[in-house]
Amino acid sequence: MVILNRPLRLIIATFLACLPLISFANGENDSTHVQTETVVHEEAAAVSEHQEGAAHEAVSQDPKEKINAFIDHHLQDSHDFVFFSDEKENAHYGFSLPVILLDGGLKIFSSSKLHHGEAVAEVDGNYYKLVHGKIYKTDAAGTINFNEHGHPENEQPLDFSITKNVVSMLFVSALLLLMFTGLAKSYKKGPIPTGFGRVLEPLILFIRDEIAIPNIGEKKYRKFMGYLLTVFFFVWLLNLLGMTPLGINVTGNIAITICLAAFTYIITQFSANKDYWGHIFWMPGVPVPMKIILAPIELLGTLTKPFALLIRLYANITAGHVVIMSLIAMIFVGKNLAADLPISLGLTLFISVIEVLVAFLQAFIFTMLSSLFIGMAVQDHHHDDHEAH
């Protein structure tokens, strides 16, 4: 692929031009900032009656609890893109993202109004508050009712916000579009790609020759190459993006893995031929009573396959993030800094190198299993042996 200088310069120039327009994640709020301290004190008194209040007190006192809370926060999605925070000044440096709610109409406002859950946002006479990464309806005082398990009971509006994970996916999607359009243009100049296309071509040939053709078949693989290439590079780049200090954990979000697995499931079922459905509902070469028993089991098997896809990707990526952050936390929990620092950094570096490999392996496995499931649905079956019996 050839990344032309002009488009690249245009993208960089546009980004730099938009930076002054993006507010800081801890920016001042006009109507709600004055009420912030009062709301926080009132909220602390109300929440202390619930288990949630006890958890917050433990977090503020115990370093281990604070680290656990930080890891949980890292694994979750966010309405703000925060690069780093200053606990002493209670300041968060980054930029806010648009909040889009459907609550008796479309409500669009900046997440800076929520001030990381410390303020109440007023929009068209409605009041909203951020609690544990989710937006709830409340009153002007920011009252949140908790159940016996410490979970908010307030009504939740439909949330279509542009969160940190959404921004990451849009960035990776734009990067994929730029990469493959550049690769396609380079092929117009000759049979051998130029520039970055020389890096992409071996990966594309690898997916074609080692994944698509063996699992789907040489006659039918081309129909599904677009999806296989997209899901491989999409998952791989998101995994690599999660390894950066930006604190992004897209593929560790189970909602994302569910969507990816759903795409594989839909493509598989709608591409399946009559032999595939025949093996599910009326398996050949099996006695009729067994056919009746096996049909619901086989039908359930069509759902367990995408379930295995989503759990494998979600669990492996989440575990990697937890391990790395836990090793880094050893520096702050341990009392002997001189001894803990080299061990913690060494283990973190070692696990990070492994995670780079895991990022590729998970993209490869997801793509390979997707092609395997598709191949099982589209391949032609021969029942001559069963008919002879």
Image (spheres, rainbow, N blue to C red):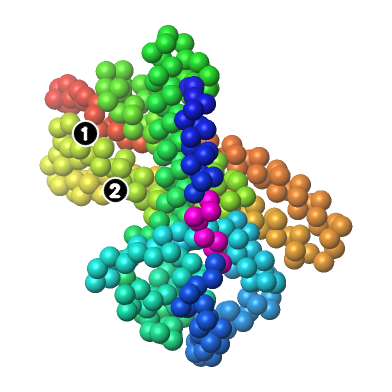
Q: Do we see residue 311 in this rendering?
A: no
Q: In the figure, is residue 266 to the left or right of 53? A: left
Badge 1: few (under 14), some or many (20 or more) residues near its Cα, within 10 Å? some
Question: Was residue 324 drawn as part of the magenta stretch in this picture?
Answer: no
Q: In the figure, is residue 3 to the left or right of 209? A: right
Which image quadrant: the C terminus?
A: top left
**Residue 31 in the image: x percent, y percent?**
46, 78
Mark 1 or mark 2: which is in front? Answer: 1
Which label belongs to residue 271?
Answer: 1
The residue to which callout 2 is attached is 303
Amino acid type, residue under disc 1 in the picture = Ser
Badges 1 and 2: C-beta atoms under 8 Å apart? no
Which residue sits at x=47%, y=30%?
Answer: 7
Majority secondary structure of magenta residues: loop
**Residue 127 in the image: x percent, y percent?**
37, 78
- Point out the tag, 1 or 2, that comes first from the N-terminus: 1
Q: CA distance from mark 1 to mark 2?
A: 16 Å
Which segment did they paint magenta? 19-26
**Residue 379 in the image: x percent, y percent?**
25, 26
**Residue 136 in the image: x percent, y percent?**
38, 75
